[in-house]
Image: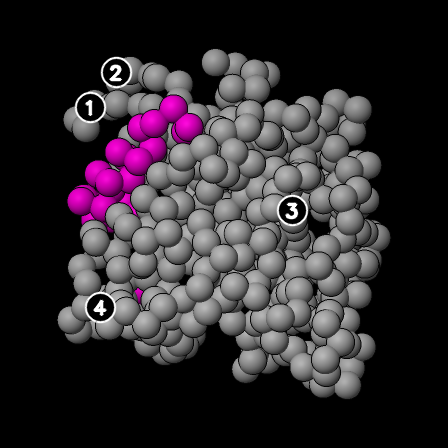
Amino acid sequence: MTRSTTARRAGVTLVAALAAVLALVAVVAVYVGAVGPGAGPASAGTSAADAPPVPAAADAPDLADLEPADGTTRFGVQLAWTEDDPTSLVGRLGLQPAQYGIFLDYPLTAERTDQLLSAARGAQAQDGDVFLTLEPMDGLTSDTAAAEALAGVLRQVNAIGPQVYVRFAHEMNGGWYPWGQQPAAYVAAFRVVAQAVHTDAPGNAMVWSPNYGGGFPFDGGGWTAKPGTADWSAMDTDGDGALTMADDMYAPFYPGDDAVDWVGLTLYWFGYTWPWGENEVPDAGRFAAQLTGTYAGGTDPTMGFAPDETAVPDFYATYATRKPMALSETGALYNTDATGGADELSIKSAWMDQVLGLGDEFPRLKMVNWFEHLKSEQEGYGVVDWRATSNPAVLATLQGVLSVPRY
């Protein structure tokens, strides 16, 4: 299948390879397309000077190639690029994911540009696209020059082969990042980036991706909005003088249909109650209920206490009906430092069944990105293995879930 076909953009290729040799045994085309930033890949001896010529915007790839048909989902991974790469991932999984995620500071520096181009080469080697998360760690900026420079780099990526999903300043409705809970500044910054991408790198998609709203206003973050400020007032959508889950934690941050190509969510299985850290199996139907604003919680003694989140808006009905939707990051918490609790396979297989074992109820959920990281969480409860391919039993479960026609 060539790069020009829509099927290549919507799916993955199933690969079986003999371990002792490098010969390709079979290729079967199937549709297949995680919380915190991953480091960028090493530049592998390349630099911006080694990059391909920047093509003109008129030579851009087709944006439509990034969206599969309704009822079809692209499976991807958020890679830990300092320890992993697309070729190694494919060797474990036996499938070629449709996109590979990378987190980079924004505006892009020369070093970050090199990392992105290196990631693009790695993705291209496995016939994949790039899911780029841009993190304005110095705060939100509406710098037109930075956005135009980004667009030029995206065209370099396109010249290598991949197209790019650009997720700008993710989880902006939370207060744990420097760009968090600043709705007016966020919308302005997003629109500047979107204008540059759409004009100068039009074959790439802008992704708007908040955090799932359960637990809003997420008190305790370093950048949580303060009462009495304009940001606070903008988020107090019901006007009662308090921020609660009764407020709409998505709408104040939406940049507009003209600026957004895809909508997305960060939504993980962390456990039943904060501060997390216990190894617990997710309750049945949780993901679908959270996606549609119908998760009523529970007090089943076998699963602990889960708070009622039915005040959270129906994200799917509000946004996915007009834009294709990505589960931008997902995974299931397995705390390697915890004693007791459920085993890794039980936890991750249950979550995979929910987010990947989808029926026909969410045809507009067209991308799922698994967070493939072993990560020490900032909350201090331990080292969490979010990965889906490190445990053979979990890996086998993932392979089985991805074997259906949806992928």
Residue type, label 2: Val
Which is more foreground, mark 3 or mark 2? 3
Please tell me which residue is depicted at 37% across the width and 65% down the height of the picture: 270
Please tell me which residue is depicted at 22% across the width and 38% down the height of the picture: 396
Distance CA(mark 2)–CA(mark 1):
7 Å
Which is more foreground, mark 2 or mark 4? 4
Q: Is residue 174 visible?
A: yes
Q: What residue span does the magenta drawing correspond to?
A: 384-407
Which is more foreground, mark 3 or mark 1? 3
Residue type, label 4: Thr
Up-down relation of residue 150 to residue 241 (above or below): above
Please tell me which residue is depicted at 58% across the width and 42% down the height of the picture: 325
Graded by Cα atoms within 10 Å as few (under 14), some (14 to 19) or many (20 or more), the crowding at tag 3 reads some
Graded by Cα atoms within 10 Å as few (under 14), some (14 to 19) or many (20 or more), the crowding at tag 4 reads few
Q: Indicate the secondary structure of the residue bearing disc 2.
A: strand
For mark 2, what is the residue?
A: 25
Apparent side of residue 67 relative to residue 303 in the rendered image (left or right): right
Distance CA(mark 3)–CA(mark 2):
42 Å
Q: Earlier in the sequence, mark 3 or mark 2?
A: 2
Proximity of marks 4 and 3: CB atoms separated by less than 8 Å: no
Up-down relation of residue 34 to residue 16 (above or below): below
For mark 1, what is the residue?
A: 18
In the image, residue 393 lies in the stretch drawn in magenta: yes
